[in-house]
Amino acid sequence: MFDFIIRGGRIIDGSGSPWYYGDVGIRGQRIAAIGKLDQAEARRVIEADDRVVSPGFIDMHSHSDVMLLANPKHEPKVMQGVTTDVVGLDGLSYAPLSPANLQMMRRYLSALNGNPDILWDWSSVSEYLARFDRRVAINVAYLVPHNTLRLETMGFVDRVATAEELTKMRELMAQGMREGAVGFSTGLDYFPCRYSNTEELVNICKVVAEYDGISVWHTRARDLGLIEAIKEVIQVAEKTGCC
């Protein structure tokens, strides 16, 4: 006995194989069977009628960092089959930040991420992620953004970081990973991320690698040209093991 059977859909299973007709049997929160389930019983049968049945899509580059909190039903994404948003992209987001820096980033990023009338009351990564957990319609994966590491360590200044400041950035990055982040992002065309040098990125990504995290880059294409910008990413990956 299944709780649900989704019958007659065109199944795309995510393996890369071509789609095929079949049924999906669900028990509890798990897919229990895929195939021809004509003789199986279920508490509820959903007739897919030649519609596509697939795993939920992951939006790997979204800027719904605060608008998802303003509209937790997230209908535009859900109606497209998106079940996970990755946020914190381009090195520009909102945690970890002190209250003053959070309000500054709220204004600074308003044209990109919106400026909704929500309670802007978090500081740490764990506090920020708690605002999403079981409160919004989809899953959320967070990348600790480069801007927060710089702002909390050295402010909005145009210079390279000192050894002491690099240590602080590493500590903040490690704390963010322990609190639930999946990696790090930077946007090297954007302020204040573009003030950094390669050494700073190496220091941060070494920590990310220790936690088996990922790094996601908006490269310095406007400063260096595309080839040189990609070489910087490769150099950091080779030195840290963080990809």
Image: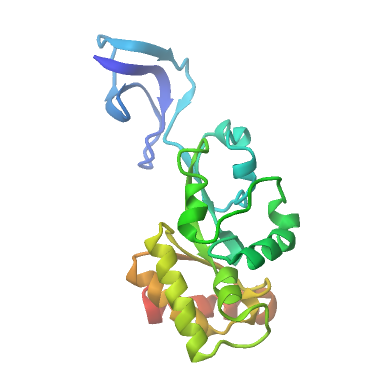
Identify the residue at horizontal 65%, vertical 45% (top origin): 67
Identify the residue at horizontal 25%, vertical 9% (top origin): 39
Q: Position of residue 6 (x, y in %)?
A: 38, 19
In the picture, the quarter occupied by the C terminus is bottom left
Residue 180, by quadrant, is: bottom left
Image height of 183 relative to 120, above or below: below
Identify the residue at horizontal 40%, vertical 70% (top origin): 174
Q: Where is residue 235 in the image (x, y as percent from the top left)?
A: 46, 81
Image height of 173 relative to 137, above or below: below
Q: Where is residue 157 in the image (x, y as percent from the top left)?
A: 68, 82
Q: Which of 43 and 135 is in front in this view?
A: 135
Is 195 placed left or right of 84 in the picture? Answer: right
Viewer can see residue 202: no
Image height of 140 relative to 172, above or below: above
In the picture, the quarter occupied by the N terminus is top left
Viewer can see residue 48: yes
Colour treatment of the image: rainbow
Identify the residue at horizontal 76%, vertical 56% (top origin): 111
Is 140 placed left or right of 109 in the picture? Answer: left
Q: Where is residue 205 in the image (x, y as percent from the top left)?
A: 43, 74
Q: How many marks?
A: 0
